Amino acid sequence: MIRIVEINESYITGFHVAFDTVSREKLFLARTEAPPIDSFRVAVRENIEKGVPQVLAIDGGEVVGWCQIIPHPRPAESHCGTLEMGLIKSYRGRGAGARLLEECLGRAGKFGLERVELEVFSSNDAAIQLYLKAGFVHEGEKIRAVKIDTAYMNNILMAKFLNS
């Protein structure tokens, strides 16, 4: 039974492990590994203190996925946030991603965000379909936006307006 929970201190290490696992697949994130645990812990703690929308998928105490919407730091863009999410491979296609996304978007509206943006690799059809189903729209494409090892990936730009 997968539970969707708000992040807290006790889950930071597990979140780091899940983030690193998905990063090392080199298929979904513009990273090849998680940042060092110390800097990761500092960033997550700061987000917790600020009330940033961050939720985790938990299976029996293990973090198997995450979704967070990081507010933009510039005052003129403070109504916007960037969505970041991932799910451990064996949990994909089972509805956990949709549940994470729905919960995090609800929290983003309560946090005061009006626009949620994301970038997704054009090869990630499952994620693109998830975002379209959740009401995101295609806003453009960045060609060769990411290069991992020798492979280039295009990023699809998507956004959703909340409370409109």
Image (tube, rainbow, N blue to C red):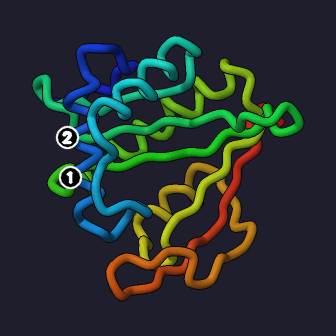
Q: How many residues crowd around disc 1 within 10 Å: few (fewer than 14), some, or many (20 or more)?
A: some
In the image, taking residue 97 as reference, residue 141 lies left or right, namely: right
Q: How many residues crowd around disc 2 within 10 Å: few (fewer than 14), some, or many (20 or more)?
A: some
Q: Residue furthest right?
A: 76
Residue that mark 2 sits on = 17
Mark 2 is on which residue type? Answer: Val
In the image, taking residue 89 as reference, residue 60 lies left or right, namely: left
Q: In the rendered view of the protein, which quadrant contains the C terminus?
A: top right
- Is the residue 113 above or below the residue 149 in the image? above
| Residue 143 x %, y % | 62, 83
| Kind of element beneath mark 2 | helix
| Residue 106 x %, y % | 59, 27
Picture quadrant of residue 56: top left
Could you tell me which residue is drawn at 36 percent across and 38 percent down? 66
Residue that mark 1 sits on = 21
Picture quadrant of residue 29: bottom left
Q: Are circles 2 and 1 on residues that touch, CB within 8 Å?
A: yes
| Kind of element beneath mark 1 | helix
Picture quadrant of residue 23: bottom left
| Residue 70 x %, y % | 59, 36
Could you tell me which residue is drawn at 34 percent across and 26 percent down? 41
- Is the residue 106 above or below the residue 124 in the image? above
In the image, taking residue 81 as reference, residue 42 lies left or right, namely: left
Could you tell me which residue is drawn at 56 percent across and 23 percent down? 52
Q: In the rendered view of the protein, which quadrant contains the N terminus?
A: top left
Could you tell me which residue is drawn at 34 percent across and 15 percent down? 8
Mark 1 is on which residue type? Answer: Thr
Q: Residue furthest left?
A: 60
How far apart marks 2 and 1 lie (CA) works out to 6 Å
| Residue 133 x %, y % | 56, 56
